[in-house]
Amino acid sequence: MPSWRLACALAAARCASGLRAPARRAAPRAPRRASASEGTILEAREVANKKAERRRIASSPTFFRTHGDFKEEQAVVQEKMLAEMKSTLLDSMRAGTFETSRGEGNAAVTFRLAQEYGMCWGAERSIELALAATEKYPDKRKHITNELLHNPGVNNMLADAGVEFVDKTADGGKRFDDVSPGDVVILPAFGATLAEMQHFDDMGVTTVDTTCPWVTKVWNVVDKQVAKGMTTVIHGKYAHEEAIATASYCDNYIMVKNIDEAEYVCRYILNPTPEGKEALLAKFAKAMSKGFDPDVHLAKVGLANQTTMYKKETQAIGKLFELTMIQKYPEDASDRFVAFDTICDATQVRQDAIQEMIQDPKVDELDFILVVGGFDSSNTAHLVEIPHDAGKTVFHINEGDCIREDNSVKHRLLNGDVVIENDWLPADRPLKIGVTSGASTPDAYVQDALERLVLLKAAISPAA
Ligand code: SF4
């Protein structure tokens, strides 16, 4: 069907269905690309105790990190959160059977919502603090050191509120030269490195720290490992902002992204050879602390994780290192390995809920599963992987605009490619769709996507 006819049909379907038109958000800005010019890769100033240094900075009178610091702004922030983030559609599904249907005949669409989905309290808290900063300091320049969290709509909202994003450069650095003493700097939900904390403290800026407390909990675990002279094995992705921040609080670390990499390291512990050492240093060159020597630094290890990794995989990695230490050092293995559970509950319950959805005998009724969440969001990617690995059809979109009037959808594949699928929805039958969303995705954005999908289905499915 020519696109102008679809556009008309969409408008007609909108009226007929009684659905409100999807909220028109500001057109997404072009993604922030790394500029070619040189940036600054900050090095942390050496300190005797990183934990004490972090606490010293956080206790500064210009460092704010709790709702209590923004009491006067709370009412207006809550109003904005309600208007921008909440969804009456999802709330009513949650209050009922988690299912709802729209349209009739072949245009009918039924949505089945996962029992746990969507924005976690840590992300919500982070947005509230960032918005509070924009309310409290209307006349100051405000910067953020990274995306607040991995959701394009949320980041655009902050940009609209006047927050400037510190530019990243192709060499892995950031352009901090735009930040001046007296400005306000917001630290994102993933946290910031010790070097950045020191830099802004030295400059005398006002800092609003929105780091999720679950991330801080991991840093507290790292502090204990450092105190025991242990190397931290981080289950995480070395380029992820949270993992980078966590690594900065370690004395020595090595980062493994999955059980295969953990097995690689454990094989070396059990069977070290000069060739194996060279290969290990090359393989983990970007994922280890400076001066890392596997013969020295793998003798005593503790486990930590990026909060959004698979809990079961983190546990398996922990068990693997524990057994490896028992085998290598049977005399005193208990002094050479330590692990605490630091996977955040929000991540885990969303993973469990999508697992339940695909294990339910009624899963075969579903035409596909729609996952809404940022394309860079690690926890959202895991919500895609679970049904995909179980052989289900999944579409991962990052916002409602991915659902297009020409019956195509822009979605992200598991390998990271963002592709267009044409002739997406079938016109000749009703549909049943499973729905979930990542921990940094506001419910309102999910509702926006579902409404677009209903309107599209009504436009392409001829009336019976
Ligand atoms: S997913 Fe967990 S760690 Fe991440 S922001 Fe939410 S509560 Fe915090």
Image: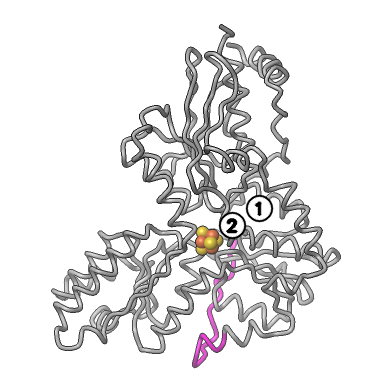
Q: CA distance from mark 1 to mark 2?
A: 7 Å
Q: Quadrant of residue 255?
A: bottom left
Kind of residue at disc 1: Asn
- Sequence-first tag of 1 and 2: 2
The kind of secondary structure element at disc 2 is: loop
| Residue at x-position 37% and y-position 32% | 362
Q: Which residue is mark 2?
A: 149
- Does the magenta segment cover residue 54? no
| Residue at x-position 67% and y-position 83% | 202
Residue 412 picture location, percent across and down: 47, 39
Q: Is 316 located above or below residue 439 in the figure?
A: below
Q: Is mark 2 within 8 Å of ligand 1?
A: yes
Residue 198 picture location, percent across and down: 61, 81
* Quadrant (top left/top right/bottom left/bottom right) for the C terminus: top right
Q: Which residue is mark 1?
A: 155
| Residue at x-position 31% and y-position 36% | 391
The disc at residue 144 is none
Where does the magenta region start and end? Answer: 37-53
Residue 405 picture location, percent across and down: 61, 23
The kind of secondary structure element at disc 1 is: helix
